Image (cartoon, rainbow, N blue to C red):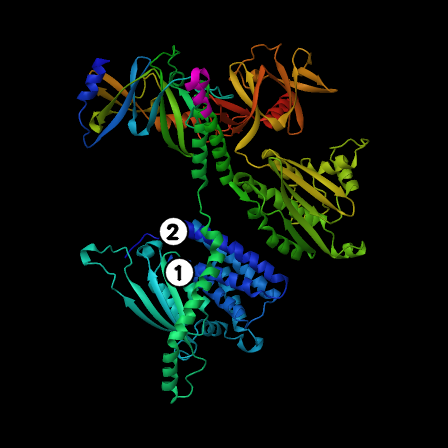
């Protein structure tokens, strides 16, 4: 029977990467103190299901590696080995290798086979060396092999006899499950007898060769736990019914030969009771399983594309509804009245629908946070500092597109905090602090934005050094006096890095300016608060979503443009504003003691835009982007609304000065101005 | 109008090597594009102008939620301006490019019909002497007593929208 298994690969990769993440997380928590058996079980389950999956798909290398890993984990689970920090390092390295192998498999790239082999050897060595380290070093592979196969023949008679009734659903095979593989795995656990039930087989001409009509009753005598048996069927969960019941427990019943008969008879008599007991136990076990899988069952994976499609359709619905609204306003009489009340209900429903769809795109920020424990652990080890990472507000939700882009800036900030912020242990102790430094990641909602704070209890920003550096680089005049806050914010200027020695952790020329630019690009802001000797706090504020912008619609001639509300400082009447011509600078606006360049879209956009109807009679809007202010000439302000951002890049390309487009209530397209881009191009053209 | 309708009825059933083309009028000449590239035909309405775009990009329109650029074929081929009238339409095409699938609209004077053109009927484009860049011509075909210029719409849209020389002044 050939089934194209490749169709399941994506799901396998996605689930495996997620599972590896969980495994890593569990491993990191394991590091902290005495091993929690539940954590070890979690880790074991991940290794086990990746092994099963990769074996099913024929990824031999991954299966073999995870098998070795599983062997080691099984020793830990059976408490035959102890969790040491060396061992958890080894396991973490295994996690990296597993991830790499999966990635290589996914991208059809080559794996560093030597590294895999080395690590696999180390794992085998660790298993072999449990207890007595001296004796076994010479033959690690053999010893590991012995440990892997729990010698079925010799000890077959020991352990518990389980009855497993395995009734697959018809589609079991189509889901990529192979009963044979499962039975082989069971056979590894102990002495197995399999009886197939063929009663459900249809007549030959009705038989669909891709369906599974068979069910099986298996008897397994094993020392393994019930849990271990159920785990063999993990991959078939939801594709079969499974009953596992202990028929008899036989604690060393066999050693005395003659009494075997009586023991058997006794067991036979007790059997009904045994079954009853097992059946009692069954529902409980199932419930526990349900709880563990609860999060899986109540969520589904949906591609972003489908959600975007849904968003587009809802957007169309909004336009249709507003068209109907305009039409409804024209109708008189009772019918018109009823139409309008229906329409207002429609409007409400559509708005709620739009909000619900937006919410679908939201994911908790913990997806980004989850990479930090490992990073902090590795970094602090490398730097010889003791750092504790605290993370709060991981459940705070934000749009997936924002989430994807916030990762790098946060990584940079956390690295900076550990490398530059937290002092060395000696320094900390000398200044009477806890030798262990703390880095705190905190996320929370504020209005329609999300704030993420990265704070540390280190030495704070070193203002004299920052100022000296800024003067040296001529970013600040030598006699200019700056407030503490202004000095702190100098670190966001381009090409600024104060660390005396560039380390390989941070300070490779890319500094806070890159972080700031990334945050700006997302339409957010970053600020820093610092207290000498007590630490510093970086506060990033980001919009919850990039898909919607709060905008002011403005008219310029016969075109409408959207100006993001966050960019608008103030709007003035052109008549009352003082606009002057300055030679070499064009028009300038005198605004609160500042002279701002005046931007006329007609000039910037080379006339491929709306032309101002009344150049001297319109409005001038003071807008700010990228830290610079300009005066933007518009004819009139049309209204404020939330607009759904559409990219121009999908079918056309990037356009300077334009952040995107949106669709107005009348179905026409309006361009969203990129104020930061505009101000930049204005100051460049002035400089040129 | 009657004549074209009659002709389209008379068009033979697809032969094995025949491809279907949508034909349209542009400055007195009939052109054809592969029907499989055509997503829809819609009436022309004034698009939103795009800053920094070449002359032959009229702007963008809303096509059921996506923002789609509109190409002015007369300007692209240097065929002079004309009044937009009731027959002026936009042919919306979907083409594969290096960046993925693009949707774009092409403004033409009027659409005519769908006709089958077999491979034997196709002549290679002349090297010179055509009003338009021969790069964009797939071939010529005789239909009835007229000549049909078959456009390579994939190449046309690709060059117009993604070529650095003629397309958006991208960053």
Q: Is residue A179 left or right of residue A441?
A: left
Which class describes the residues within 10 Å of circle 1: few (<14), some (14-19), or many (20+)? some
Question: Which residue is identified by label 1?
Answer: A55
| Percent position of residue A484, x then y | 78, 37
* Magenta-highlighted residues: A327-341
Residue appearing at x 42%, y 50% in the figure: A11
Quadrant of image for the C terminus of chain A: top right
Q: Is residue A270 above or below residue A306?
A: below
Look at the magenta stretch and give its main secondary structure: helix
* Residue A571 vs residue A519, the one in the foreground: A571
| Helix, strand or loop at mark 1 | helix
Residue appearing at x 45%, y 82% in the figure: A252
Question: Which residue is identified by label 2?
Answer: A8
Query: Are the numbered discs 1 and 2 placed on the same chain, yes or no?
Result: yes
* Residue A290 vs residue A60, the one in the foreground: A290
* Residue A40 vs residue B131, the one in the foreground: A40
- The question of residue A543 being in magenta is answered with no
Residue appearing at x 73%, y 40% in the figure: A529
């Amino acid at each position: 029977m050939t089934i194209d298994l490749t169709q399941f690969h994506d799901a396998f990769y996605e689930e495996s990467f997620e599972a590896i993440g969980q495994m890593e997380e569990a491993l990191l928590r394991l590091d902290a103190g005495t091993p929690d058996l539940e954590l070890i079980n979690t880790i074991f389950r991940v290794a086990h299901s990746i092994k099963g999956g990769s074996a099913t798909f024929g990824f031999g290398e991954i299966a073999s590696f995870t098998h070795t890993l599983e062997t080691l984990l099984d020793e830990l689970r059976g408490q035959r080995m102890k969790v040491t920090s060396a061992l958890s390092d080894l396991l973490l390295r295994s996690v990296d290798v597993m991830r790499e192998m999966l990635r290589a498999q996914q991208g059809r790239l080559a794996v560093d086979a030597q590294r895999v082999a080395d690590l696999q050897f180390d794992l085998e060595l660790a298993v072999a060396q449990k207890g007595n380290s001296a004796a076994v070093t010479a033959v690690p592979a053999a010893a590991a092999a012995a440990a892997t196969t729990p010698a079925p023949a010799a000890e077959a008679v020991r352990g518990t006899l389980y009855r497993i009734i395995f009734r697959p659903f018809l589609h079991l095979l189509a889901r990529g499950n192979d009963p044979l593989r499962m039975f082989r795995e069971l056979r590894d656990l102990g002495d197995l007898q399999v009886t197939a039930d063929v009663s459900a087989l249809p007549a030959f001409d009705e038989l669909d060769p891709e369906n599974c009509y068979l069910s099986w009753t298996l008897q397994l005598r094993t020392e393994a736990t019930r849990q271990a048996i159920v785990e063999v069927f993990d991959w078939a969960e939801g594709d079969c019914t499974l009953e596992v019941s202990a028929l008899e427990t036989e604690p060393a019943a066999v050693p005395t030969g003659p009494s075997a008969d009586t023991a058997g008879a006794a067991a036979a008599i007790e059997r009904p009771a045994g079954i009853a007991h097992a059946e009692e136990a069954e529902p409980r076990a199932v419930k526990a399983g349900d709880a563990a899988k609860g999060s899986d069952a109540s969520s589904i994976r949906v591609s972003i594309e489908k959600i975007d499609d849904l968003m587009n359709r809802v957007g169309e619905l909004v336009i249709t509804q507003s068209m109907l609204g305009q039409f409804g306003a024209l109708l008189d009489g009772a019918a018109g009245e009823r139409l309008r009340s229906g329409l207002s209900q429609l409007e409400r429903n559509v708005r709620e629908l739009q909000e619900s769809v937006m919410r679908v795109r939201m994911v908790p920020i913990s997806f980004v946070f989850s990479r930090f424990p490992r990073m902090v652990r590795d970094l602090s080890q490398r730097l010889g500092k003791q750092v504790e990472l605290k993370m709060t507000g991981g459940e705070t939700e934000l749009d997936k597109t924002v989430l994807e882009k916030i990762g790098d800036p946060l990584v940079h900030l956390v690295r900076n905090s550990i490398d530059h912020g937290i002092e060395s242990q000696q320094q900390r102790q000398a200044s009477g602090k806890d030798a262990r430094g703390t880095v705190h990641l905190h996320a929370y909602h504020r209005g329609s934005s999300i704030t993420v704070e990265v704070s540390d209890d280190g030495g704070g920003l070193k203002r004299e050094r920052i100022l000296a550096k800024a003067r040296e680089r001529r970013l600040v005049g030598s006699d200019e006096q700056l407030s503490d806050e202004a000095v702190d914010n100098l670190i966001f200027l381009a090409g600024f890095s104060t660390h005396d020695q560039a380390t390989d952790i941070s300070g490779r020329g890319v500094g806070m300016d890159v972080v700031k630019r990334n945050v700006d690009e997302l339409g957010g802001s970053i600020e820093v608060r610092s207290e000498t000797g007590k630490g510093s706090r970086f506060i990033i504020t980001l919009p919850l979503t990039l898909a919607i912008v709060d905008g002011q619609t403005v008219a310029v001639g016969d075109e409408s443009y959207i100006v993001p509300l966050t960019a608008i400082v103030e709007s003035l009447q052109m008549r009352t504003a003082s606009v002057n011509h300055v030679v070499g600078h064009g028009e300038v606006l005198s605004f609160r003691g500042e002279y701002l360049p005046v931007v006329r879209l007609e000039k910037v956009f080379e006339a491929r835009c709306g032309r101002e109807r009344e150049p001297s009679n319109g409005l001038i809007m003071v807008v700010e982007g990228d830290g610079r202010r300009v005066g933007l000439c518009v004819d009139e302000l049309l209204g404020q609304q939330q607009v759904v951002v559409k990219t121009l890049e999908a079918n056309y390309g990037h356009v300077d000065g334009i952040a995107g487009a949106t669709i107005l209530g009348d179905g026409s397209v309006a361009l969203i101005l990129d104020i930061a881009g505009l101000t930049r191009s204005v100051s460049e053209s002035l400089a040129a | 109008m009657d004549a074209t309708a009659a002709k389209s009825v008379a068009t033979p059933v697809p032969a094995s090597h025949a491809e279907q083309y949508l034909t349209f009028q542009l400055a007195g000449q009939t052109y054809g594009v592969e029907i499989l590239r055509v997503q829809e035909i819609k009436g022309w309405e004034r698009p939103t102008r795009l800053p920094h775009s070449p002359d032959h990009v009229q702007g963008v329109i809303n096509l059921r939620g996506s923002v789609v650029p509109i190409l002015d074929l007369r300007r692209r081929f240097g065929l002079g301006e004309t009044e937009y009238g009731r027959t002026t339409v936009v042919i919306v095409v979907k083409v594969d490019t290096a960046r993925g699938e693009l949707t774009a609209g092409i403004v033409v004077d009027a659409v005519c019909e769908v006709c089958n053109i077999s491979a034997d009927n196709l002549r290679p484009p002349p090297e010179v002497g055509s009003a338009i860049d021969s790069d964009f011509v797939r071939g010529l075909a005789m239909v009835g007593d007229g000549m049909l210029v078959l456009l390579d719409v994939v190449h046309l849209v690709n060059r117009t929208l993604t070529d650095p020389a003629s397309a958006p002044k991208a960053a």
